[in-house]
Amino acid sequence: MFFKGRRRNIIILKLFSGYLLKLYETLAVSAALGVLIILSGFFSAAETAFTGFSAVKMKRLAKNSRRARLVLELNNNYGDVLTTLLIGNNIVNILATSLATVLFSAIFQGGGVTLSTLVMTALVLVFGEVSPKTVAKEFPEEFAMFSAPAIKVCMCAFSPLCRLFAVWKRLLAKIFRFNKKNKKMTEEEFGIIVSDIADEGVLPREEQKIILNALRYGETKVASVMIPAENITYIDKSESINEIKRKFADSNYSRIPVASGGLSRVLGILYRVDFYEMLINGRSDIFPLIKPAFYCKPTDNISELLKIMQGARRHLAIVADGSRVAGLITVEDITAQLVGEIQDRYDSVPENPHAPPPAE
């Protein structure tokens, strides 16, 4: 009886020890599985952070933060950083899937593989992809600085693989003839970025308008900005001094074209200051005061015209389409396309009341 009881106790002890060992192995595998999912989330979040952080903010932080300087250093080799993160993410995801398959097969036998696939898909999707990327997108600078030291260590550990993939990328570039020169930001893409920044409240709306106007500034033609010929205020050489005086007073223009028998024959430009100085001096002949007119074409770009007018120190240009006067344009008309109408308190009417508003 004594030996039978002892044998039974030994069997129970062995069974209990086997159960404890199996429980320990299950807990160890589960803990390892949790660590791998956390690492998967870390690599996913780091990828989002390094893709989305603001270089301007990071440079400002780098003045007082060593980690920010490390982020900028790593970002100079962004291709290697991305390769390292992808390698790390794939390694931990594969290991996690393998461990989960072993664990669930041991517990649930035949149905373990299917259950492992379902559970791991949900865990990796929620905790390894969506959640960490969402957090990193909201705090890209902070997470990039947090993850930078670990990423640097991983880059050193995975450097042989990174070099191997670098060779593979060069081979793909030759096969598919990638052209890096074509990967430039277009004006349209830049405009979208500016609009997005303004929508987020970072950029004031007025500054947004100026930037967007500047994008179209170089392509704007004189014809779309000028005062049409039928709306030009001009002085006929046959008009009396009182009529000329009234035109300056009514329009408040500082310069008015002088013509003979209509705009088909422009004699030049009369300056208001010269006209009133003539009246003060008791003279009445405006012809010695008429300055030569400056001409341009309707198809000229306003950006180039502004440079020419600044060089020639001209404020007003007659727009000529062949032998016909098509309109008139001033420096204010051109600059208004960038910053909007500029008027001082003495302007009773705009310098160009018929010109279209600046592009927005």
Image (cartoon, rainbow, N blue to C red):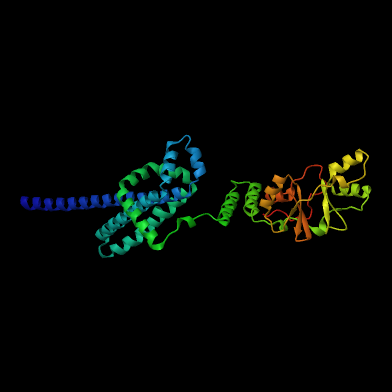
Say if residue 158 shows up in the picture. no
Residue 359 vs residue 27, the one in the foreground = 359
* Residue at 6% over, 50% down: 2
Specify the quadrant of the image occupied by residue 71: top left
Left or right for 64, reference 346: left
Which residue appears farthest toward the front when viewing the image? 288
In the image, what residue occupies the spot 27% across and 52% down?
29
Q: Position of residue 35 (x, y in %)?
A: 33, 49
Give the tally of numbered discs. Answer: 0
- Counting from the top left corner in percent of width and height, residue 312 is at 72, 46
- Say left or right for 47 vs 329: left
Which residue occupies the extreme top position in the image? 64
- Residue 294 in the image, given as x and y percentages of width and height: 76, 51
Q: Nearer the viewer, residue 214 or 22?
A: 214
Q: Is residue 4 left or right of residue 230?
A: left
Quarter of the picture containing the C terminus is bottom right
Name the foreground residue: 147 vs 16. 147
